[in-house]
Amino acid sequence: MPQKTIIIAPSILAANFGNLAQAIQMVNESQADWLHLDIMDGVFVPNISFGMPVCQAIQSLAKKPLDYHLMIQAPERYLPVFKELGANSISVHYEACTHLHRQIQTIKDLGCKAGVAINPHTPVSVLEEVIEMIDLVCLMSVNPGFGGQKFIPQSLQKIEKLRNLIEKNNAHALIEVDGGVNANNMQSIIAAGANVLVAGNFVFNSPNPLQTIAEIRTNTTLAKRTTNNDKQHL
Ligand code: DX5
Ligand code: ZN
């Protein structure tokens, strides 16, 4: 069974902030589907990325749907703000929410796609009670806080487990894989069942980011997920 079209979400964190307009223009013209924005508060993660004024500038220039990844403690303080900042989807971290169910509901009430991000050490089973109500799971394949890290290989098994959880519950959540995605691992990531690829350094630190995005499109269109059905025939 051929995999549905993969969503490509370049992460603006890896762009040259001295020329953000050019980076966004490149994404606008590219075959990317979403623009991924990493918001870090220096508390939940040991790094601070960028804040509202920068998001506002990005919003005014970007033509692709904005995918906000909130690496912040108690994200409920800012959900309406990110809606105002053009969010198409908002992911909050499971580890940062005491009342995750309520935050998911708030994001949906705001009219955004609701996402939950999980750290590498967090088992996918914690999502069992909310999987049916969410639109997106941001599965962290590095420890959040920094771009340019190495993909954690165990993430592939987690993607498979999450795919099973989604199918078992007849849920519709997309699996977004975030961290260390590159040409060497994207085929396996898709084969494991991912729908959305976030790519920061692989795109923005390549000699020709526009072409790199086009190559991700080609590579992922050719990729094929090994379904249970396929496995039975192996
Ligand atoms: C890490 C961020 C990622 C990061 C990905 O905390 O959530 O979105 O920007 O960057 P790369 O693709 O360079 O690992
Ligand atoms: Zn991210």
Image (cartoon, rainbow, N blue to C red):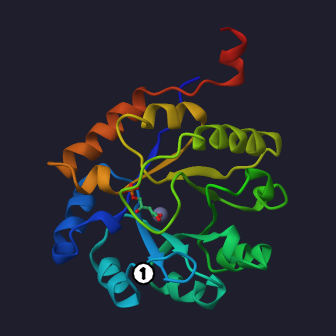
Q: Residue at x 46, y 54 (%)?
A: 179
> From what the image shows, is residue 194 above or below residue 133?
above
In the image: residue 4, left or right of residue 64: right
> From what the image shows, is residue 86 above or below residue 159?
below
> From what the image shows, is residue 115 above or below residue 152?
below
* Residue 218 falls in image quadrant: top left
Front residue of this view, candidates 61 and 47? 47
> From what the image shows, is residue 61 above or below residue 215?
below
- Residue at the spot of label 1: 48
Front residue of this view, candidates 154 and 211? 154
Provide the secondary structure element on which disc 1 rests. loop
Q: Does residue 20 appear in this view?
A: yes
Residue positioned most to the top: 233
In the image: residue 145, left or right of residue 219: right
Residue 101 drawn at (x, y percent): 79, 73
Residue 22 drawn at (x, y percent): 16, 68
Residue 68 drawn at (x, y percent): 49, 71
**Residue type pointed to by label 1:** Ile
Ligand 1 lies under 8 Å from the Cβ of mark 1 = no
Q: Quadrant of the C terminus?
A: top right
In the image: residue 55, left or right of residue 69: left
Front residue of this view, candidates 32 and 92? 92
Looking at the rendering, the quadrant in which ligand 1 lies is bottom left
Q: Quadrant of the N terminus?
A: top right
Q: How dense is the environment of label 1, judged by Cα within 10 Å: few (below 14), some, or many (20 and up)? A: some
Residue 200 drawn at (x, y percent): 35, 57
